[in-house]
Image (cartoon, rainbow, N blue to C red):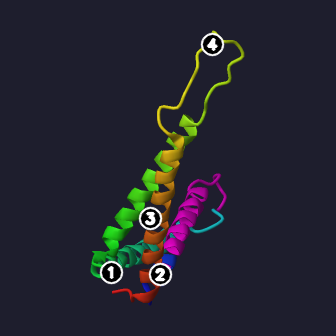
């Protein structure tokens, strides 16, 4: 199984566990004299099995991420880099949006707002960060599809 396939399976297991939790909660209480729509004991057993499968899969994914290298960096390091770049791009874009909001003046005596940074220069920085993010993500995706799960 390729690492990418394991990641897809992990997402499916996480969704299945969320659905099982909802089904369990929907069948936790019933009116006296009534039966639950689904057997909670069987749902609990299904949840335990799915959770064990997820635990095993996540362990294997993490071991693979730590073992596979791309240009001298482990996948674990690349994932951390991608997360960091994603955060920097998001925060910088929000800052630029705020810095781009200059107030309209209707009279000369009103307070004038101006940007505290060069929006044009900061936009170049965001563009460079976004490019680095795309390249990092592409490298991760390529490694995911070309490496087998340990």
Left or right of 119 in this view: 58: left
Q: Can see residue 49?
A: no
Dot placed on the residue nearer the N-terminal end, 4 or 1:
1
Q: Residue at coordinates 38% horizontally, 57% vertically from top-left? A: 84
- Residue 38: x %, y % from top left: 62, 67
- Residue 138: x %, y % from top left: 48, 75
Dot placed on the residue nearer the N-terminal end, 3 or 4:
4
* Label 3–label 4 contact, CB within 8 A: no
Say above or below: 43 vs 64: above
Q: Can see residue 36?
A: yes
Mark in the foreground, 4 or 1: 4
Dot placed on the residue nearer the N-terminal end, 1 or 3:
1
Total tally of numbered discs in the picture? 4
Q: Residue at coordinates 37% horizontally, 77% vertically from top-left? A: 61
Q: CA distance from mark 3 to mark 2?
A: 21 Å
Which stretch is magenta? 9-35
Say above or below: 51 vs 124: below
Q: Main secondary structure of the magenta part?
A: helix
**Label 4 environment density (alpha carbons within 10 Å; few <14, some 14–19, many ≥20):** few
State the residue position of label 1: 64
Mark in the foreground, 2 or 4: 4
State the residue position of label 3: 132
Say above or below: 110 vs 29: above
Q: CA distance from mark 3 to mark 4?
A: 42 Å
Mark in the foreground, 3 or 4: 4
State the residue position of label 4: 110
**Label 2 environment density (alpha carbons within 10 Å; few <14, some 14–19, many ≥20):** many
Q: Residue at coordinates 65% horizontally, 56% vertically from top-left? A: 33
């Amino acid at each position: 199984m390729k690492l990418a396939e394991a990641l897809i399976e992990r997402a499916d297991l996480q969704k299945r566990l969320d659905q099982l939790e909802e089904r369990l909660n929907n069948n936790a209480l019933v009116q006296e004299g009534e039966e639950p729509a689904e057997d909670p004991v069987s749902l609990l057993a299904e949840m335990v099995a799915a959770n064990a499968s997820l635990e095993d899969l996540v362990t294997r994914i993490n071991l693979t991420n730590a073992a596979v290298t791309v240009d001298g960096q482990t996948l674990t390091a690349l994932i951390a880099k991608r997360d960091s770049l994603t955060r920097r791009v998001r925060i910088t874009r929000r800052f630029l949006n705020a810095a781009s909001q200059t107030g309209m003046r209707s009279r000369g005596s009103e307070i004038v707002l101006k940007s505290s940074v060069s929006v044009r220069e900061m936009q170049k920085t965001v563009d460079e960060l976004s490019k680095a993010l795309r390249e990092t993500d592409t490298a991760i995706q390529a490694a995911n599809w070309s490496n087998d799960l340990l």
